[in-house]
Every structure is written in structure tokens, then in C-alpha cells.
Amino acid sequence: MVITYNGDNYFKIQSGNFTVLIDPGDRRSFRGANAVLSTLKPAEAVPDEGETFFVDNQGEYEVGDLALKGISLGYEGGAERTAYRFELEGIKVLVLGHLVKEPAAETQEYFHGADVVIAPAGGKPYLSETLVGKIVRQIEPALIIPTLFNPPAGGLKNFLREFNKSECVPEEKLVLKAKDLKAGAMEVRCLK
């Protein structure tokens, strides 16, 4: 699995010839994607009908060999927020998206068992770094990928402190194999 970052909360996750996009900023990005997941509804960019499989709310979906679950995080500021959990190459990925308030305990039960968690890490306007840290520590993933933070305004300092880290060197892409992930390691890896 290869994960690349394209700014804001836009990630591209590739597994062989299968591509999942998370929160792409424009329709040009959809070319070649098998699935597009939007964590915020209404979405900024929506594909033309038939172009690609598009998900923007809760429910269980299948696209080829990909089974995914959309988990409602409720409405805030007139927008529905959705977290997604899916598995590719034996790696369970959880995308917390535009999380602004702590989800109910029964919602958080769906988060457990994730190997990789993509989490908002910049505080306001999203959930505080302390509460995101608490949620992620309960999940105990192998890998944490921070998103939705503002580098000039303190960046990741507070988020990293939640995991007893002082820095996170940004990488161009992450290449992951299930056998290399250590459950509970909670390694923080940054993408640029």
C-alpha cells in the first residue's frame, strides 16, 4: 500500500491498480480513482455520475475487493462529518476526517482494531490535540498519520506531545506492508 498526501485532508491510497482518494479538492483528481471518500458533506468536489464510486455518508459499501464502512460523526456547522474504516492488503485504515467533537463511546467502538489512523492534528477548528490523542491511544494503532494542521501556527507540536514525540520528519510517501506494522506501536509518520 502506498499513501501520499496532497494538502488539507486529501490523501491518495494505492494498492496495486486500486486507488482510493480521501477528500480530493477538485474533480481533476478523480481520474483513475476507483473510490472517492468525502469526510465532509457537502463535499467540495463531486464526480460526474459513473466516473467513479463516490461515498459521502455513513453506511457499508463494497467497491471491487474493497469493503468500507462510513461512520457518522454527526452534524456541525451545517455539514455532516463521516469517518471511514476500510481494509486494503490486510491493513485496516481509519480516517477520522474533519472531527470537531468527541464521538460517543458506541461510535468509537467502530474505531478499534485499526492499523493506520489518519487523524486531525492541529486543534481548532477541529477536535483538540488532547482529545484526538485520547481517542487514538484507545485504538492503539501501529501507525498514526496527522492531517489538518497549520505548519506556521505551531504545527504538530501539541499533537506530537500527546505521543511523547518532539518531531516528525515529513516524507514524500509511505509504503506499507501489513507484516511490517507492529500493533500498538503508535508510530507517528508525517507526509508532505
Image: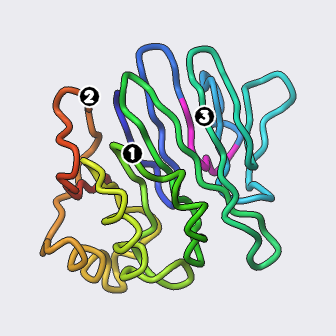
* Residue sticking out furthest to the right: 49
Q: Taking 29 as reference, is 167 left or right?
A: left
| Quadrant holding the C terminus | bottom left
Q: Position of residue 83 (x, y in %)?
A: 59, 54
Which color mode does the image show?
rainbow
Q: Mark 2: which secondary structure? A: helix
Q: Which residue is mark 2?
A: 178
Q: Nearer the viewer, mark 1 or mark 3?
A: 1
Residue 57 pos. (x, y %) = 75, 49
- Callout 1 amino acid: Gly
**Between discs 1 and 2, the one toward the N terminus:** 1
Question: At x 48% / y 14%, what residue is drawn?
Answer: 17
In the rendered image, the vertical position of residue 21 relative to residue 17, given as above or below:
below
Residue in view at x 73 percent, y 25 percent: 52
Q: CA distance from mark 1 to mark 3?
A: 14 Å
Kind of residue at disc 3: Leu
* x and y, in percent, of residue 15 in the image: 42, 21
Query: Which label number is shown at residue 68?
Result: 3
Give whichever of 143, 125 is nearer the camera.
143
- Quick check: 192 left or right of 97? left
Instruction: Find the magenta span and give its range.
Output: 20-26
**Magenta span includes 60:** no
Q: Is residue 27 left or right of residue 9?
A: right
Q: Secondary structure at mark 3?
A: strand
Q: Which residue is mark 1?
A: 113
Q: Nearer the viewer, residue 44 or 91?
A: 91
Q: Quadrant of residue 82?
A: bottom right
* Secondary element at tag 1: loop
Where in the figure is residue 124, as x and y percent of width and height? Answer: 51, 85
Q: Is residue 12 left or right of residue 130?
A: right
Which label was assigned to residue 17? none
Q: Residues within 10 Å of mark 1 (few under 14, many from 20)?
A: some
